C-alpha cells in the first residue's frame, strides 16, 4: 500500500503575516501576498500554505478562496511553536545597500535575535530604509523556515550605542588591529552576547579606543586577512553559532 502523502507538502509556500494565528481561524491576506501565491506559486483553492505570525509559531492552512486581489485561508493545525533563538545581537556598521542587504539576509538565516545597525565615521552609507530592510528580513525568514523574526533596531551612532550598552551583555568587537582569536573567545563565554563589525573604511582610532574602553567589550580577531564588512559579519556570526549558539 502506498504511503499517505505528508500534509502540508514540503513544497507548500511559506509566508509571515501580522495577524495572530489560531486553529480554525479564517484569514484574509492582502493583494501583494495574494498575487505572490496566485501568480508566482500557482496556489489555488484547496491548496496548502504555511503561515507564521512571529508570535505563536507556524501553522498549516488551506486556501478556501483565491481571488486576484485577496485570498482567504483557513488555519488548520499548528506545526511548530515559535522558536527560541540564541541571545545574540548583531551590531553591523552600515554598508552600501546591496552589501548590507546580504548582512540582513544572512543574520536572519543564521539565527541572530536582534540586528542593531551602527553609524560609524567611515561608513559610506548614512541611512537605512527600515521598510526595505524588514522586507529583506521577512523574505529570508520565509526561505530558511525560521519562525521568529529578528528584531530590527533603529540606526544608532556608535557613541550612543556604547553609552547605552547593557552591563549584562558581552560585546565582541571585531577589530582589524587584533584581539583574541574569535572562536576561542566565543567558546569561553556563556550568556547574552553581541558582535560589533565595522564599515568599509574600518574603525578610526578614536572609535577603536572608545569601544575598547567599554567594560563589556572583548576585542577579537577574525584571522590574518582584512575582510569586507559583510564577510566579517557573516564569518563572525557563523563562528559564534558554532561555538556558543544553536549549531
Image: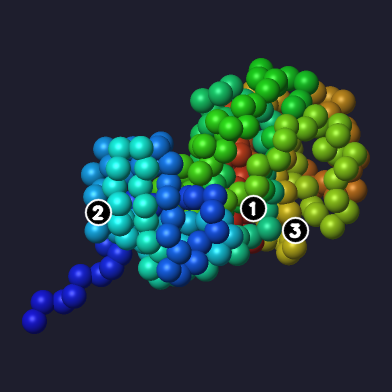
Ranked by sequence position, the earlier of labels 1 and 3 is 1
Residue 145 seen in the figure? no
Residue 67: image x %, image y %?
A: 30, 43
Number of marks in picture: 3
Residue at left offset 51%, top offset 25%: 98
- Res. 192 mark: 3
Residue at 58% across, 32% down:
131
Query: Helix or strand or loop: what does disc 3 sit on?
Result: loop
Dividing the image into 4 quarters, which one contains the N terminus?
A: bottom left
Name the one closer to the observer, 118 or 244. 118
Q: Position of residue 235 (x, y in %)?
A: 56, 43
Asked if residue 216 lies left or right of residue 102, the reply is: right
Q: Marks 1 and 2, how far apart in space?
A: 36 Å
Q: Is residue 225 left or right of residue 48?
A: right
Residue count near mark 1 (Cα–Cα under 10 Å), binned few <14, some 14–19, many ≥20 = many
Q: Identify the element where label 1 is drawn.
A: loop
Please tell me how crowded label 3 is: few (under 14), some (14-19), or many (20+) other residues with Cα within 10 Å. some
Location of residue 226 with respect to 86 vertically, above or below? above
> Which label belongs to residue 45?
2
> Which of the pair 7/64 is nearer the observer?
64
According to the picture, the residue beneath numbered tag 1 turns out to be 113
Q: Nearer the viewer, mark 1 or mark 3?
A: 1
- Give the distance between the C-alpha atoms of the residues marked 1 and 3, in whole angstroms: 10 Å
Q: What residue appears at the point 51 percent right and 44 percent down from the top-left corner? A: 138
Q: Can residue 143 be seen by looking at this rendering?
A: yes
Amino acid at each position: 500500500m502506498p504511503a499517505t502523502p505528508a500534509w502540508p507538502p514540503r513544497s507548500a509556500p511559506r509566508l509571515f503575516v501580522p495577524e495572530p494565528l489560531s486553529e480554525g481561524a479564517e484569514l484574509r491576506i492582502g493583494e501583494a501576498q495574494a498575487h505572490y501565491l496566485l501568480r508566482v506559486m500557482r496556489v489555488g483553492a484547496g491548496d496548502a500554505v504555511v503561515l507564521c505570525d512571529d508570535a505563536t509559531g507556524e501553522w498549516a492552512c488551506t486556501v478556501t478562496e483565491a481571488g486576484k486581489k485577496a485570498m482567504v485561508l483557513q488555519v488548520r493545525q499548528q506545526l511548530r511553536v515559535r522558536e527560541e533563538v540564541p541571545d545574540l545581537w548583531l551590531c553591523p556598521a552600515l554598508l552600501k545597500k546591496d552589501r548590507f542587504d546580504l548582512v540582513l539576509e544572512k543574520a536572519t538565516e543564521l539565527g541572530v535575535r536582534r540586528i542593531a545597525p551602527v553609524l560609524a565615521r567611515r561608513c559610506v552609507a548614512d541611512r537605512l530604509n527600515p521598510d526595505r530592510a524588514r522586507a529583506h528580513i521577512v523574505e529570508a525568514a520565509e526561505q530558511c523556515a525560521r519562525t521568529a523574526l529578528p528584531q530590527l533596531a533603529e540606526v544608532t551612532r556608535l557613541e550612543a550605542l556604547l553609552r547605552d550598552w547593557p552591563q549584562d551583555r558581552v560585546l565582541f568587537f571585531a577589530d582589524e588591529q587584533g584581539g583574541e582569536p574569535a572562536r576561542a573567545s566565543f567558546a569561553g563565554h556563556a550568556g547574552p552576547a553581541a558582535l560589533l563589525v565595522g564599515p568599509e573604511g574600518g574603525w578610526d582610532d578614536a572609535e577603536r579606543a572608545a569601544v575598547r574602553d567599554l567594560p563589556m567589550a572583548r576585542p577579537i580577531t577574525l584571522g590574518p586577512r582584512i575582510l569586507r564588512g559583510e564577510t566579517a559579519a557573516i564569518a563572525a556570526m557563523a563562528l559564534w553559532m558554532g561555538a556558543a549558539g544553536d549549531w
